Image (spheres, grey):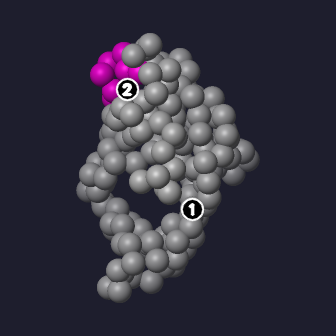
Amino acid sequence: MSRRIDYHHDPDAPAANSIVPSVNVAVTNEAAEILLIRRSDNDNWALPGGGVDLGESLAEAAVRETLEENGIECEVTGLSGIYTDPHHVILYTSNGEVRQEFSIVLTARAGQGVDGGGHHPDGGVPPSAAGCSRRASRVPGLLGLTPAEH
């Protein structure tokens, strides 16, 4: 399996050879829970998200990525921030790409596909996510945190 390796301020990190804007989505439900995914390519927890396809808006990409990865529909509600760091690079072992981090994080609320308790009907991993590099999970109590509050 190909892997994703993140380097943060690591002097031994490979040099970046690409930068690709991506969208991530902080999806919350009525129970004030935020949706996180656990990546199977590096076992890290992350917000759902990915690249913007040609012909789609940032908000459309956010909704599509959340639905593809989790089977959860969401409605974009705002902008959390734009995060870039030339000292955070991501090595994709499948093709040798070393990507400089560039992420636009949107906020959203969960729609259909999530019950009142914030759970996906099948326990968190919809059939559409089978074989995906990300698995759905949820972490309660993270609503409203900003990087300055961590």
Asked which quadrant contains residue 62, the reply is top right
The image shows residue 101 at horizontal and vertical percentages of 51, 66
| Residue 126 inside the magenta-drawn segment | yes
Please report the residue visible at 46 percent of the width from the left and 27 percent of the height from the top: 32
The image shows residue 3 at horizontal and vertical percentages of 30, 61
As displayed, is residue 138 above or below residue 4?
above
Please report the residue visible at 36 percent of the width from the left and 67 percent of the height from the top: 6
Please report the residue visible at 53 percent of the width from the left and 17 percent of the height from the top: 112
Q: Depth check: give the residue in front, 78 or 20.
A: 78
As displayed, is residue 71 above or below residue 81?
above
Element at label 1? strand
Please report the residue visible at 33 percent of the width from the left and 66 percent of the height from the top: 5
Q: Depth check: give the residue in front, 31 or 98.
A: 31
Sequence-first tag of 1 and 2: 1
Q: Is residue 76 left or right of residue 28?
A: right
Query: Which quarter of the rendered picture does the N terminus lie within?
Result: bottom left
Question: Which range of residues does the magenta coloring cover?
Answer: 118-129
The amino acid marked with disc number 1 is Tyr
User: Residue 38, labelled with which disc?
Assistant: none
Q: Depth check: give the residue in front, 132 or 103.
A: 103
Query: Which quarter of the rendered picture does the C terminus lie within?
Result: bottom left
User: Can residue 109 be seen by looking at this rendering?
Assistant: yes
As displayed, is residue 116 above or below residue 59?
above
The residue identified by callout 1 is 83
The residue identified by callout 2 is 126
The image shows residue 124 at horizontal and vertical percentages of 33, 27
